[in-house]
Image: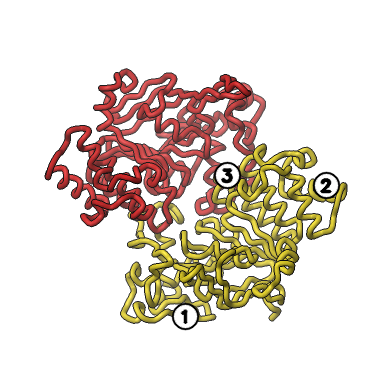
Amino acid sequence: MTEPLLAVRDLSIRFGDTEVVDRLSLTIRRGETLGLVGESGCGKSVSSLSLLGLLHGARVTGSIRLDGQELTNLSPQGWRRVRGGKIAMVFQDPMTALNPLLTVGRHLEEVLETHKGLRGREAQKFAADWLEKVGIPDPVRRLEAYPHELSGGMRQRVLIAMALAGEPDLLVADEPTTALDVTIQAQILDLLANLRRELSMSMLFVTHDLGVVERVADRLAVLYAGRLVEEGPVGEVLVRPRHPYTEGLLASVPGFRARTGRLRSIPGQVPSPSEWPSGCRFHPRCDRAGDICRTTRPDLPPDGRPACHFPLEAGS
Amino acid sequence: MSLLSVHDLRVSFPVRGGLLGRVQGQVRAVDGIDLDLAAGETLALVGESGCGKSTTARAILRLIEPDSGEIRIEGKDIRAMDAETLRRFRRRAQIVFQDPSAALNPRRTAFQAVAEGLRTHDLASGPELRARVLELFSQVGLSEEHLNRHPHEFSGGQRQRIGIARALAVEPSLLVLDEPVSALDVSVQAQVINLLEDIQEKTSVGYLFVAHDMGVVRHIAHRIAVMYLGRIVETGPAEEICTDPRHPYTRMLIASVPALGGDRAVDTASRGELPSPLDPPTGCAFHPRCPLATSECAAVRPELTPVDGSRLSACPRTAT
């Protein structure tokens, strides 16, 4: 078997004394989309930022290998080559990710200069090509537009064009459609899926929305309180979740499959990193928890079983 | 008699521009809509940003003054009320906002937030007031230890429970819920939805539920009204709207929801963006994005007409 494009091993992230991600291991194969899901504060965004060396003031330990290259010990110069060229990111809020003083064209030309060595006319031509690829009408004229002149959906398309212009192997998309209306979200999800196929990229898609994950991802990794609790093919995990948290999360989504009776909610709330429980961090909210769950952290075995002492039966 | 009936409601906002901030035009945020809600019923007002759903909700409570139209709550014409009558009447119709941290005064305790309405309307005082607040707290799943805490000491879900307790304190017959669960995590969102359903079962309060999440709406609403650029384009029973949408915009909306859409037919694929409300399209406002549009759609604005049973759709091309 060939080496995966991305292999994250035992990634831990600390801010001061507070550990926000605890020994996370993930792989993404070439051409694959991995969905990383969880609720606020589970560590999904910090994990994805760490893949691009964008976490400041955090202590990151463990290993991140992209296409055989270790990223955790890169120099700032090394990061500049990797970021945008091999791995790129699309953020949730396209307004804050764009510089309000620069035109759309300038944003793109900067990426093309840095990673493709293109300048002047040629850079402009490629910039317009990219705008066309992401479905922006009248691309040549739009190069002159400023971010505030575009709708939210159009800004997100510009951001995607910027991320892809360096032709990265891996695109990290952190809640890229959360700020958008649902009809625009559908367009952006289709666009990302088509471009991923066309450019044979891999994608890490970070979201809290299980419906979105079902539509875009091949595999799914579920985070709870800084730890991976379950991982597997999207169809299997969403149809037959085996971790009680995944199962509870699915049952909490109204209208996900059909109109149901009363929603089965998970009691309590997501704990904050400073007060994460001992043993299995889900145990205070879990109706299957036993004594061992309070004391002993369950491992995530490599065979598709969840990180749980009392998992749900396969096929139940 | 309906709990709430709205007829031909219109709300517009002046658009200012230029150096002197002169009024340059009007945006018709709500452009002639009718609504009807019975006691114990949940009517969801859905649509995407800028469709006018929140403006409608606020205008119904006269938090924004409408331009014209008739609004009756429990049969009373609330647009005809003077300020004092309206103030007393507010007991009957309350609102819960999307962002509970912005809706609560950070300097006041949870007790004060919930007790204020009871004091204002002379419903309780002294030990009775405390007992009533405690009762409301337990109704929304909070306990005595929470009474003297300030908003920042609560999680988002708990703050929304305070917002709901505050609205319920004065025993309204109508509760306007403006995106009440949008800011909450999924597991907490389910708790609040269950709470709202329990309260309705016990008190027969009517909910006007403003939301953009079709999954939530499908779960909680009895009926749905879909808005696009200030107009209602389709209305009917919730499950019918979600499983068999008729208006081309509703079809696009439902097909766009990842969990509900399933396989999408070509004619429901999302295309185009919301036009500027400053310069709305002629005829049917949806025609520039509509796969079924003809030249007639750009010329004539379609009215809501019955399609079958209790369904109404403002599109002559999908009437069957």
- Say the numbered circle drawn on residue A299: 1
- Say the numbered circle drawn on residue A183: 3
Query: Where is A306 relative to B155, above or below?
Result: below
Q: Secondary structure at mark 2?
A: helix
Q: Rounded to the nearest whole Å, what is the CA distance between mark 3 and mark 2?
A: 30 Å
Q: Amino acid at mark 3?
A: Thr
Lower position in the chain sequence, tag 3 or tag 1: 3
At 50% from the left and 24% from the top, the residue drawn is: B13
Q: Chain of mark 1?
A: A
Q: Secondary structure at mark 1?
A: loop
> Is B285 positioned to the left or the right of B160 in the image?
right
Specify the colour of chain B: red
Determine if residue B192 is in view: yes
Query: Where is B20 relative to B95, above or below?
Result: above
Residue B182 rendering spot, x and y as whole percentages: 44, 48
Residue B224 rendering spot, x and y as whole percentages: 42, 38
At 26% from the left and 41% from the top, the residue drawn is: B168
Q: Nearer the viewer, residue A240 or A162?
A: A162
Query: Where is B21 relative to B167, above or below?
Result: above
> Is B212 positioned to the left or the right of B267 in the image?
left
> Is B154 positioned to the left or the right of A86 in the image?
left
Q: Residues within 10 Å of mark 2 (few under 14, many from 20)?
A: some
Q: Amino acid at mark 1?
A: Asp
Q: Chain of mark 2?
A: A
Q: Chain of mark 3?
A: A
Of circles 1 and 2, the one toward us is: 2
Q: Which residue position holds label 2?
A: A124
The quarter of the picture where residue B190 lies is bottom left
Q: Are marks 3 and 2 in contact (CB under 8 Å)?
A: no
Which quarter of the figure is the N terminus of chain B placed in? top left
Q: Rounded to the nearest whole Å, what is the CA distance between mark 3 and mark 1?
A: 40 Å
